[in-house]
Amino acid sequence: MKLNLILFVVLIIFALTTVNFKHQTRNNYAELDEENKKTLDLKDQQTMLRIEESSESRIEIIEKSAKHKLNMRVPSKEEKKVIIK
């Protein structure tokens, strides 16, 4: 009788431990999934920033070429004319 009670208690402890382990595993998997989504979002954001950076550097290169090679400049207010059709 005493042995049966001890075995029953040990069985309950193992059962609770197993349930707790599975619960922690599911929680960890959910956290991992969220972190993977954040990683993908950050990679997308990094790609967009790199594209934006490269386009800005192209604009700067074009402006430098226009100023130095072609002697271009921004017109003053007096030089601007509005043409209406």
Image: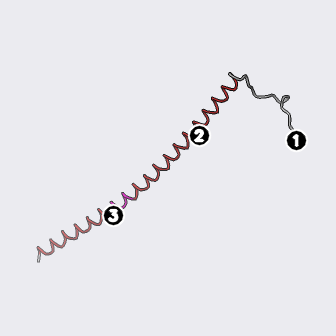
Comes first in the chain, label 1 or label 3: 3
Eye-nearest disc, 3 or 2 = 2
Where disc 3 sits, the SS reads helix
Could you tell me residue 36's position as x and y percent?
43, 52
| Residue at the (35%, 62%) spot, across then down | 26
User: Viewed as shown, does residue 85 lie left or right of 64?
Assistant: right
Are discs 3 and 2 less than 8 Å apart at CB? Answer: no
| Residue at the (81%, 28%) spot, across then down | 76
Spatial separation of the CA atoms under disc 3 and disc 2: 44 Å
Eye-nearest disc, 1 or 3 = 1
The quarter of the picture where the C terminus appears is top right
Comes first in the chain, label 1 or label 2: 2
In-front residue for pair 81/78: 81
The picture quadrant where one finds residue 79 is top right
Q: Which residues are magenta?
A: 23-29
Spatial separation of the CA atoms under disc 1 and disc 2: 35 Å
Looking at the image, the residue that sits furthest to the right is 85
Are discs 1 and 2 less than 8 Å apart at CB? Answer: no
Amino acid type, mark 2: Glu
Amino acid type, mark 3: His
Q: Is residue 26 magenta?
A: yes
Amino acid type, mark 1: Ile
User: Viewed as shown, does residue 61 lie left or right of 75?
Assistant: left
The residue beneath circle 3 is 23
| Residue at the (68%, 22%) spot, across then down | 69
Where disc 1 sits, the SS reads loop
Prevailing SS of the magenta stretch: helix
Please say if 34 is above or below 13: above
The residue beneath circle 1 is 84
Q: Which mark is residue 52?
A: 2
| Residue at the (59%, 40%) spot, across then down | 52
